[in-house]
Amino acid sequence: MKQTDYQLHLVELISLIRDKSTYLQSIEKDSEEYDKNTFEGMALAYHFVMDGIKTYVECNEDLSLEEFGLEDYDPSEILEYKPKES
């Protein structure tokens, strides 16, 4: 596999993780699916993963946030997600 293929796959994987975290906002607060501790744990886990990815890219001089679509992204926004009100 070529280097550009790896980079494209990595960008896609980062986008998938970032998009998956937004799923939390679709959970209805009054549904059986919602559990406060689970919700907060998932938000924290997604935050740690995305913060780690962003920090890694920022600290690597061969990479740029722009290459991965993370230049305006703040992983802390995940911690602000709330379940959907019914």
Image: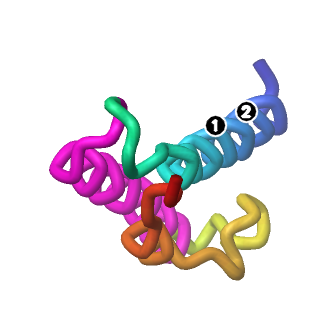
Mark in front: 1 vs 2: 1
Where residue 7 appears, x then y in whole percent?
74, 41
Mark 1 element type? helix
* Residue at image point 30% right, 49% down: 39
Q: Residue at x 25, y 56 (%)?
A: 40
Whether pointer 1 and pointer 2 mark residues with C-beta atoms closer than 8 Å, the reply is: yes
Residue beneath disc 2 = 9
Q: How many marks?
A: 2
Q: Is residue 35 left or right of residue 2?
A: left
Q: Position of residue 74 (x, y in %)?
A: 54, 78
Relative vertical location of residue 65 with respect to residue 42 in this rendering, above or below: below
Quarter of the image with the N terminus in it: top right
Dot 2 falls on a residue whose secondary structure is: helix
Q: Residues within 10 Å of mark 1 (few under 14, many from 20)?
A: few
**In magenta segment, residue 22:** no
Residue 13 marker:
1
Majority SS type along the magenta span: helix
Residue 81, percent from left and from top: 46, 66
Q: Report the magenta residues as a range.
A: 33-59
Please say which color scheme the image uses.
Answer: rainbow
Give coordinates of residue 32: x percent, y percent. Answer: 32, 31
- Is residue 40 located in the magenta-colored stretch of the structure? yes
Please tell me which residue is depicted at 65% across the width and 65% down the height of the picture.
Answer: 63
Q: CA distance from mark 1 to mark 2?
A: 6 Å
Instruction: Kindly identify the amino acid type of the residue bearing the numbered disc 2.
Output: His
Query: Foreground: 37 or 20?
Result: 37
Q: Quick check: 57 left or right of 55? A: right
Is 68 positioned to the left or the right of 23 in the image?
A: right
> Badge 2, how many Cα within 10 Å: few under 14, some, many 20+?
few
User: Which amino acid type corresponds to the residue marked 1 in the rendered image?
Assistant: Leu
User: Considering depth in this image, is 70 or 32 the residue closer to the camera?
Assistant: 32
